[in-house]
Image (tube, rainbow, N blue to C red):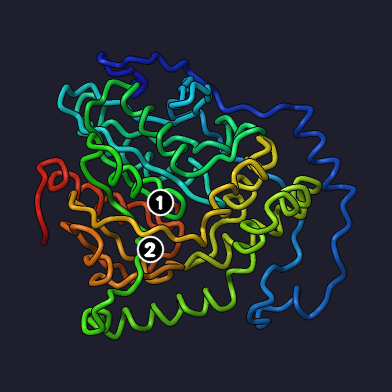
Amino acid sequence: MADYSKIPAGAKLQPKPFKCHVDEEKLKHMLDLLKLSPIGPAVWENTGKDQGETKMSRPDRKHGMHHLNSFPQFMISIQDSEGRDYDVHFMALFSEKPDAIPIGFYHGWPGSFMEFLELFTLLKKKYSPKDLPYHVIAPSLIGYGYSSGPARDLDLHLDRTTEIMHKLMLGLGFTSYLAQGGDVGSMVSKTMATKYDECKGMHLNMFASPPPQDEAKAKDIDEFEAQCLQRGQEFRDKGMAYALEHGTRTGTIGLVLSSSPLAMLAWIGEKFLEWTDEDPPLDTILASVSLYWLTDTFPRCIYPYRRLFERPQLPYINKPCGYSYFPKELVPTPRSWAAATANIVSYSRHTGGGHFAAMEKPAELLADVEEWIPKAWKGESKL
């Protein structure tokens, strides 16, 4: 059997093999709560398909969870700049090639490392450990899944999470690496590319950038991009209530959703249905919500929202950047807008796909990333 679990010889830290697991008592408690939880009455807003912005339909109680341990999983202890220790979980495919290129894939909310399962599957089918051109790392961000949560006496912020993700790559023995992400993962990737010389470039499938101040450049969009921008505006007008709740009443929503797996399913399941181009399989939604419940991910994970509306202005990113444009992305930034903030060396526009690109369109995203990697690693300039 092909072994993708061999840690690179130059690793400074030694991660321990890890098996994703379910605490049986926790699982029983979840199932008991589901049996006891009343489902709200059937009303117009939750029974039909034409309710517009009212969204979530009445759920059933079936439970499912993907088998995750067919991919190498690890746990590693990393210390931040203040001496705090964090346990970081990650899924990886390590190559035996001495010149393999390291790349980190970073998930968002309400996702997890599970977003990359299909992409990893494609890589395993395409390459053996002997000819895999990359070391592929998909961590659970701090507060998510099996990774440590924020300390109770610490105002955790995204810069600290990014620092820990950076130290993970260095700890695995990589002197340089690349970063890819969407949603929160796009912010992690941007921060890595901005702050750390070892990060040689980033690839994003959510490229949140404001319109250029130059009015002519701001209007440099085509009809397709204009239609996508209109959908993005509809999301900003009608779909941001959850983010406001996360950012301004973080403790309250955390306690509410931690009290009921059914409530968590409604809150998170809605996002998987609304933010995708096509509805994902029910098992995918149930597995994702189950992981959140069984690992107490909510409310540990929503700290990035407390600074979401500060919108710090990042400097222009000179490093080679890639951009995959999926039309149903919540933040469908036109190519010209992205190019005003970063050195775009690789760009692909797709006719389908939404916010969870790695889950929805893994083959397309992987092809884009593979097209970008050699350009980024060689340090190429603009298209």
Contact between labelled residues 1 and 2, with CB atoms less than 8 Å apart: yes
Image spot of residue 271 (x, y percent): 59, 62
Q: What kind of residue is marked 2?
A: Ala
Q: What type is the residue that disc 1 sits on?
A: Met
Secondary element under disc 2, as helix, strand or loop, is loop
**Residue in the foreground of this view, choosing between 35 and 346:** 346
Counting labels gives 2
* Mark 2 or 1, nearer chain start: 1
Instruction: Characterize the local packing of mark 2: few (<14), some (14-19) or many (20 or more) Cα atoms within 10 angstroms.
Output: some
Name the foreground residue: 315 vs 58.
315
Q: Quadrant of the C terminus?
A: bottom left
| Quarter of the N terminus within the rendering | top left
Q: Residue at x 22, y 37 (%)?
A: 197
Quadrant in the picture for residue 352: bottom left
x and y, in percent, of residue 378 in the image: 10, 42
Q: Secondary structure at mark 1?
A: helix
Relative image position of residue 35 (x, y in whole percent):
86, 47
Report the residue marked by disc 1.
Answer: 187
Q: Residue at x 41, y 53 (%)?
A: 182
Q: Is residue 79 above or below residue 257?
A: above
Residue 228 picture quarter: bottom left
Up/down of 42 relative to 180, above or below? below
User: What's the residue at 69%, 36% (across, down)?
Assistant: 294
> Which residue is found at the position 15% from the left and 41% from the top?
377
Task: Locate residue 34, reporting x and y percent.
Answer: 82, 47
Q: How many residues crowd mark 1 within 10 Å: few (<14), some (14–19), many (20+)?
A: many
Q: Which residue is mark 2?
A: 208
Q: CA separation, marks 2 and 1?
A: 9 Å
